[in-house]
């Protein structure tokens, strides 16, 4: 028997795995989506979303991709998984994502293929947009110069390609590697953590999507969760998931503040530690990841 059975859930409510069903439309996310869709529709060229670790950048990128109907947009999402990416790889990958079936080996030939494809998309009355997640991995000047070149693909009075970077605050350092590109940022939005009220709504929302008919966390428990998570969704998920597991082990009907205190103690979480993780401190992040791995091993 698992905690989902114990609480009558259809699925785990607080997994950190991407799942569109659990998207929570906070005020921050709603405002970001409105601004980015306007930037795309106005062909602004380059827009940037900056957020701390676990703030929901990837969730927002996937949501934006989902709400762009294919009859109006040719859109794609690229996730930068490491910092060893080359300009040639970026160019070929973007070309493929936008519909170039066999990108040429020569860079100038690929640019010609991409330009022709963008013209075709424009003739169809659609807009081309590429979302770049984990953009802080783009750590070389040649990469930034390549993106600046892509933004130069245009026709009189109109840009043919829109780019949106989603990244940690370090993405600003990447942009400054090529000052002309940094100056082309038409929209910059900073994604902040959830408020205490939104934290409560977020927990209720995820429980409801998971099939719960009741609130499984007491109000004092939610207050403790907010204090130790600082409103960062990834940390909220981690705490809540482990709290439900502990409540299941103790055969309780709801999570109490005592359980939350026990869980955050086992995880080694403090408000200061989470705040440093949200700010992108690598040593602190490594410590948290090690603690989470330890907790998962304990659960299994």
Image (cartoon, rainbow, N blue to C red):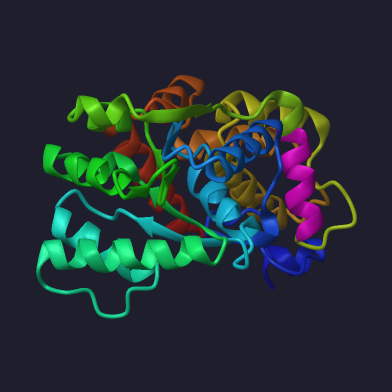
Q: Report the residue at 43% width, 68% height from top.
A: 120
Q: Tell me residue 44's x, y (percent).
A: 47, 37
Q: Report the residue at 48% width, 60% height from top.
A: 122
Q: Report the residue at 22% width, 53% height from top.
A: 82
Identify the image quadrant of residue 90: bottom left
* Vertical placement of residue 100 versus 161, above or below: below
Q: Tell me residue 174's x, y (percent).
A: 24, 32
Identify the image quadrant of residue 94: bottom left
Q: Residue furthest bottom?
A: 102
Direction from residue 277 to residue 83 in the image, left or right: left
User: Which portion, as a residue range, is magenta?
Assistant: 199-209
Q: Tell me residue 202's x, y (percent).
A: 72, 41
Q: Is residue 206 magenta?
A: yes
Q: Residue furthest left?
A: 106
Q: Is residue 283 magenta?
A: no
User: In front: 44, or 168?
Assistant: 44
User: In front: 267, or 180?
Assistant: 180
Q: Report the residue at 56% width, 26% height from top.
A: 192
* Vertical placement of residue 210 versus 283, above or below: below
Direction from residue 180 to residue 186 in the image, left or right: right
| Principal secondary structure, stretch drawn in magenta | helix
Q: Tell me residue 48's x, y (percent).
A: 43, 35
Tell me, yes or no, if residue 300 can be seen here: no
Identify the image quadrant of residue 181: top left
Q: Residue furthest front?
A: 156
Tell me, yes or no, if residue 147 can be seen here: yes
């Amino acid at each position: 028997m698992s905690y989902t059975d114990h609480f009558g859930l259809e699925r785990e409510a607080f997994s950190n795995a991407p799942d569109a069903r659990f998207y929570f439309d906070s005020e921050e996310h709603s405002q970001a989506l409105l601004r980015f869709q306007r930037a795309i529709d106005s062909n602004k060229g380059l827009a940037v979303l900056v957020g701390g670790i676990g703030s929901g950048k990837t969730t927002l990128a996937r949501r934006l991709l989902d709400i762009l109907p294919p009859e109006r947009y040719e859109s794609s999402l690229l996730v930068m998984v490491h910092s060893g990416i080359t300009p040639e790889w970026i160019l070929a990958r973007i070309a493929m994502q936008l519909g170039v079936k066999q990108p040429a080996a020569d860079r100038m030939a690929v640019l010609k293929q991409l330009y022709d494809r963008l013209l075709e998309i424009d003739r169809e009355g659609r807009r081309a947009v590429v979302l770049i997640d984990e953009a802080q991995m783009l750590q070389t000047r040649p990469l930034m110069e390549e993106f600046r070149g892509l933004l130069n693909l245009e026709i009189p009075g109109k840009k043919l390609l829109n780019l949106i970077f989603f990244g940690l605050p370090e993405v600003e350092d990447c942009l400054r590697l090529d000052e002309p590109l940094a100056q082309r940022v038409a929209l910059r939005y900073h994604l902040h953590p959830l408020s205490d009220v939104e934290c409560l709504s977020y927990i209720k929302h995820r429980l409801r999507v998971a099939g719960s008919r009741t609130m499984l966390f007491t109000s004092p428990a939610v207050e403790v969760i907010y204090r130790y998570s600082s409103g960062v969704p990834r940390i909220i998920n981690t705490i809540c998931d482990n709290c439900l597991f502990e409540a299941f082990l103790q055969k309780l009907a709801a999570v109490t503040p005592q359980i939350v205190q026990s869980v955050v103690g086992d995880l080694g979480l403090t408000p200061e530690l989470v705040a440093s993780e949200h700010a992108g401190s690598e040593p602190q992040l490594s410590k948290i990841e090690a603690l989470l791995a330890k907790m998962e091993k304990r659960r299994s």
